[in-house]
Amino acid sequence: MSSTSFWNTSTKDIEVTDGTIHHYLGMYTSLMASYMVKGGWMFQVWGSHSPTARVIQGRILRNYGGGFAIQKRFLKDKASVNLSFYDVLKSRWFAFESYNFGDYQMTSIRRWESRSVFVSFTYNFGKLTEGKERRENNSGGIGDDVDVPISQ
C-alpha cells in the first residue's frame, strides 16, 4: 500500500516577498507492505519520506523513517502477539533553516526519541461478525436493501 500527498501554499507578504505572490510546494509519501505466511505469521515493513520543502521564511529539511512488525496468531486465530519496531534508523527529526534576512539567520533542529519497541497481546472473545450480517443481527433481520418510503 502506498500513499503520496502534494500540496501548494501561496503567500503574499510586503516585507518578505515585496508584495508578490510566492508558491511553495510540499510532498509526503509513505509505503507499507505486509506478507502473511503459513502458521499464523505476518510480517510488515513501512517507511515514509518528506523531501526538503521551501516555505516563506526558509526551508524545512527532508525527513524519513520506517519500521517493521512481526505478528503471530494462535488459538484458532482468536489470539495474537505483535512485536513492532519504530524508527529503526533513528532518523526522525524536524529541521528548519531560515533565509538570511540581513539581521538574522536561524537553524533549528529538533530530534525526538522516536526509536521504540512495542509488544502487544490481543485476544478476541466471542464470535466476530462483519458487515451486513452484523447490521441484520442488530436490526432484527432488516437489512440495508429494504425500501424506505419517501415522505412528501
Image: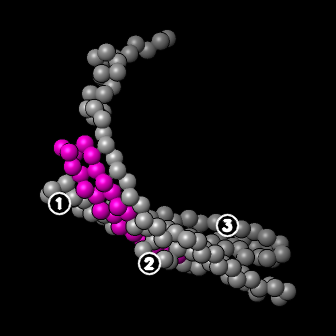
- Secondary structure type for disc 2: loop
Q: In which quarter of the image is residue 25?
A: bottom right
Say which of 147 and 31 sits in front: 31
The region drawn magenta spans 63-84
Alpha carbon separation for disc pair 3 and 1: 48 Å
Residue 65: where, in percent of width, then height?
Answer: 46, 73
| Mark closest to the chain's N terminus, 3 or 1 | 3
Residue 72: where, in percent of width, then height?
Answer: 25, 56
- For residue 89, the mark is 2
In-image side of 117 versus 94 (left or right): left
Q: For the point 55% across and 71% down, which residue is it?
A: 113
Decide: is 83 above or below 92.
above
In-image side of 117 versus 14 (left or right): left
Q: Name the residue under label 1.
A: 37
Residue 91: where, in percent of width, then height?
Answer: 50, 77
Structural crowding at the residue carrying mark 1, measured as other residues with C-alpha within 10 Å and reported as few (<14), some (14–19) or many (≥20): few
Q: For the point 66% across and 74% down, which residue is it?
A: 55
Amino acid, disc 1: Val
- For residue 10, the mark is 3
- Secondary structure type for disc 3: strand
